[in-house]
Image: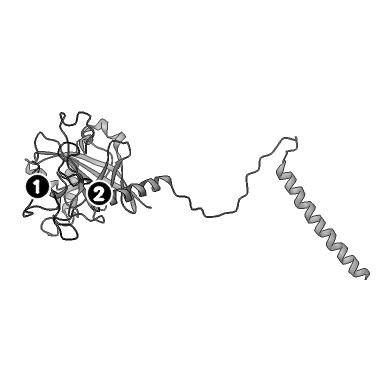
Amino acid sequence: MKKKTKLILILTLTIVTLILGALLVYLIRSNPTDPNGDPIDFPAILPDRETDTVDPKYEEYRELFDANKQINEDYVGELIFDSGLIQESFVQAKSCFKKDGTMYTFYNEDGSLVTDPTGYTGYDVYIWTYWKTGEYDYNDHGGSVFLDYRNELADQNLIIYGHHFSEWNDPTRSKAFTPLEVLLKEEGYAENANVTVVLEHEIRHYVIAAVYEFDSTDDYYWDNCQYWRFDYAYDDYTGTADASYHQKYLDALKQVRLYDTGVELTTEDRTLTLQTCISGFTGQLYEIVVMKEVDVETY
């Protein structure tokens, strides 16, 4: 009996000691002081755990994408200059016919309805037609901002088109791609160099690598500056392989660019190209902005 009583006593003292020790630690951490009696702040000790928090930016992008997709299934994404210079939704028509086989309702520059699609491509569907309403729009939005009808999002070079407005039609210089004119001068570059494209499940980040004016009356540009190629290893119109053309284009960019951005392009880079007209009449002079993809996020 004596051995059993002694064992119980030892266990009891051990438990009491542990309880008192834990209480002492709690009191010290609740009211910690240093040797001078000043309070001590300990960092909180929290268990590691995964959280379900979502970056508000991603939630905003998701809401924007879903809302625009409901308006028009041809909505592809959002083109956003980080400086705020431009934020434009862009769409894409792959041909003159919708996925269900019916012909798009779209217009010529003069506002006449296209009834025979012969000679037209997906390029023509949104150039004078506003994507939210499906109506002719010459003055308010200048049609729509749109992705080249041949492009797939996996292509090495994406081409997006938008209108440039004259002074009388856009005195604030804010419609469609009109604000791109600030990039024609080097002093407009630094502030507006970074661009974000929001797609359905990706956020692609770009930096502007080159800005130039494409002169459609000059054979040099037609031969060396074919910015409309979505895969530079091929001729986009004939499908003929031409692996050397990409380097030829990059070399030409150094000759025709309006200023040196300090951003180098290689044949391995993925690019985004913006085109807008800047001459007094359509088809003579275009502003071309070539961007280098620098990062891709999924969301």
Residue type at numbered disc 2: Thr
Q: Quadrant of residue 34?
A: top right
- For the residue pair 14 and 216, the one nearer the viewer reads as 14
Q: Quadrant of residue 163?
A: top left
- Tell me residue 206's x, y (percent): 30, 45
Give the left or right position of residue 145, taking residue 194 as reference: left
- Tell me residue 200's x, y (percent): 32, 53
Could you tell which of marks 1 and 2 lies nearer the N-terminus? 1
Give the left or right position of residue 81, taking residue 22 as reference: left
- For the residue pair 7 and 138, the one nearer the viewer reads as 138
The crowding category of the residue bearing disc 2, from other C-alpha atoms within 10 Å (few below 14, some 14 to 19, many at least 20), is: many
Q: Quadrant of residue 192?
A: top left
Which quadrant is home to the N terminus? bottom right
Residue designated by label 2: 271
Give the left or right position of residue 198, taking residue 26 as reference: left
Mark 1 and mark 2: Cα distance apart in space: 34 Å
Query: Which element is circle 2 on?
Result: strand
- Tell me residue 275's x, y (percent): 18, 43
Residue farthest to the right, as pictured: 2
Query: Which element is circle 1 on?
Result: loop
Relative to 23, is 15 above or below?
Answer: below
Q: Which mark is residue 113?
A: 1
Q: Which mark is residue 48?
A: none
The mark total stands at 2
- For the residue pair 123 and 4, the one nearer the viewer reads as 123
- Tell me residue 247's x, y (percent): 19, 50
Disc number lying in front (1 or 2): 1
Residue type at numbered disc 1: Leu
Residue drawn at point x = 14 percent, y = 59 percent:
241
The crowding category of the residue bearing disc 1, from other C-alpha atoms within 10 Å (few below 14, some 14 to 19, many at least 20), is: few
How did the renderer colour the structure? one colour
- For the residue pair 198 and 6, the one nearer the viewer reads as 198
